[in-house]
Amino acid sequence: MASMRRPPIGEQGARPTHSGVPFSGQPLGMEATEWQLRCELAACYRLADMYGMSDLAGTHISVRLPGPVDAFLLNPLGTFFDEMTASSLIKVDLEGRVLGGAAERLNPAGFVIHSAIHMADHALTCVLHTHTRATIGVGMQADGLLPLTQKAIVMQHVTRYHDFEGAALDPGERERIVRDLGPEGRVMFLRNHGALSVGRTVAEAWAWMYRLEAACRYQVDGLSGGRALHRLPPEIIEHTAAQGRRILGPGGYAEVGALEWPGLIRKLEREQGSGYRT
């Protein structure tokens, strides 16, 4: 386990683990921070479904809990994203022992993928995995995400790739997932399988995945038109990529997840109510 761990990058270790929208009303005996993260994670599931990034009861999103015990929250297998609640989430440690929730509904592939990141970097609190038409489509293409749009170019510095090894049931794959993500990766194509995003908060991981999904949809649409593409010159790609580092990174005016999350929570509650935080 220790060999997988890496130090936090830059300012990441100093940021709070939650996304800034407060949630009260935790059950008796539960720490307020755990309830906060449970509510955020349940909201993230609902938002992923709302924005077309769910796959029935497949795929998974996790958040690491602070405290003396290395543990994270994960969805119970069989619960759809649009019905996830804060209290229904499973708590599991890094050895796969279920500490709370329905042990028989722990997704073994979900455990392998998420425990890989949570073992390796405590600064990356949230891990989000999807199977969407657009990200799988681009992940099947040999060249991956192409620098054809602003959305794709500003993400180049955080985009990574992991080759398909079959269903993620082998704990040995965890080291290769961490290796391929690297210290600066924030989104990763799981080739021929899906996509993964990580963040210092739930908000950041969700917003990175939203951006990746949008960039992939644009690419699939552009390539399907059957017409010659307008290719950008290398100097413009390099300039835009550098802008992306400044704009989207820590302290940037559009730091990923920092501005969007409160509005997303308001939208979720307008359209679905507050049932996710029960």
Image (cartoon, rainbow, N blue to C red):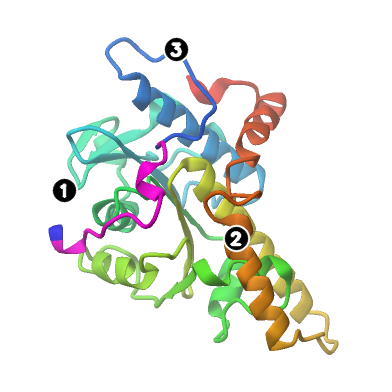
Q: 191 or 258, which is in the foreground?
A: 258
Q: Which residue extends farthest top?
A: 28
User: In percent of the image, x 32 and y 49: which residue is there?
Assistant: 107
Mark 1 or mark 3: which comes first in sequence?
3
Q: Is residue 265 visible?
A: yes
Q: Is residue 158 left or right of residue 119?
A: right
- Residue that badge 2 annotates: 246
> Which range is magenta?
3-16
Label 2 sits on a secondary structure element that is: helix
Residue 237, disc: none
Residue 95, disc: 1
Q: Position of residue 264 (x, y in %)?
A: 65, 36
Q: 130 or 260, which is in the foreground?
A: 260
> CA gap, disc 1 to disc 2?
38 Å
User: In percent of the image, x 22 and y 58: which residue is there?
Assistant: 5
Q: Is residue 47 above or below residue 197?
A: above
Residue 25, disc: 3
